[in-house]
Image (cartoon, grey):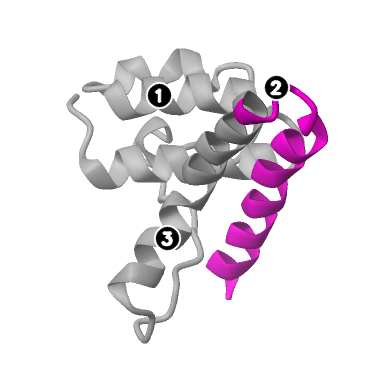
């Protein structure tokens, strides 16, 4: 079965949750999120979530009700919605840039930045 954009976004949100809870590190998140973004079929998501417990993407729940994913209020601007959805990938890219430009001297910032952003984005999404 083909994946919709909403199902792909749900899978990315679930991966972010696993990062926030410490089940995935940033490198593994980057690898899996790239594969989710490129996935065309539901079957391509299965190996990406086989070793992870709940939550699971709604596309993998086989007819069960989709998990209740908190949504942002309708009063948020489209820019705020975009930044909240894209915060972790943007932070990962910035962390890599900082790591390269600092030649490894700011390693702690490169590791901490995406983790802090993931926690803040998760807190914002739950509001």
Does the magenta run of residues contain 114? yes
Image depth: mark 3 or mark 1 in front? 3
Image point (64%, 53%), residue name = 117
Q: Give the mark, 1 or 2, whose residue is nearer the N terminus.
A: 1
Q: How far apart, in angstroms, are the residues tagged by discs 1 and 2? A: 25 Å
How crowded pointer 1 is (Cα within 10 Å; few <14, some 14-19, many 20+) is rated as few
Q: Residue at x 63, y 17 (%)?
A: 51
**Residue 37 sits in which quadrant?**
top left
* Helix, strand or loop status at disc 1: helix
- Which portion, as a residue range, is magenta? 101-127
The spot of residue 71 in percent (x, y) is 45, 68
Label at residue 83: 3
Disc 3 versus disc 1: distance between alpha carbons? 18 Å
Which element is circle 2 on? Answer: loop
Q: Are marks 3 and 1 in contact (CB under 8 Å)?
A: no
Disc number placed over residue 103 in the picture, else none = 2
Q: Are marks 2 and 3 in contact (CB under 8 Å)?
A: no
The tag on residue 86 is none
Q: Position of residue 1 (x, y in %)?
A: 19, 24
Can you tell which mark lies on residue 34?
1
Q: Position of residue 35 (x, y in %)?
A: 38, 20
The kind of secondary structure element at disc 3 is helix
Residue drawn at point x = 40 percent, y = 24 percent = 34
């Amino acid at each position: 079965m083909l994946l919709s954009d909403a199902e792909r976004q749900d899978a990315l949100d679930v991966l972010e949750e696993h990062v926030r809870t410490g089940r995935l590190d940033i490198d593994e998140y980057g690898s899996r999120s790239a594969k989710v973004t490129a996935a065309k079929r539901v079957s391509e998501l299965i190996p990406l979530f086989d070793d992870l417990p709940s939550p699971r993407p709604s596309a993998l729940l086989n007819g069960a009700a989709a998990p209740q994913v908190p949504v942002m209020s309708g009063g948020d601007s489209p820019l705020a919605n975009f930044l909240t959805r894209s915060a972790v990938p943007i932070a990962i890219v910035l962390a890599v840039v900082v790591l390269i430009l600092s030649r490894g001297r700011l390693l702690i910032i490169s590791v901490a930045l995406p983790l802090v952003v993931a926690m803040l984005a998760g807190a914002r999404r739950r509001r």
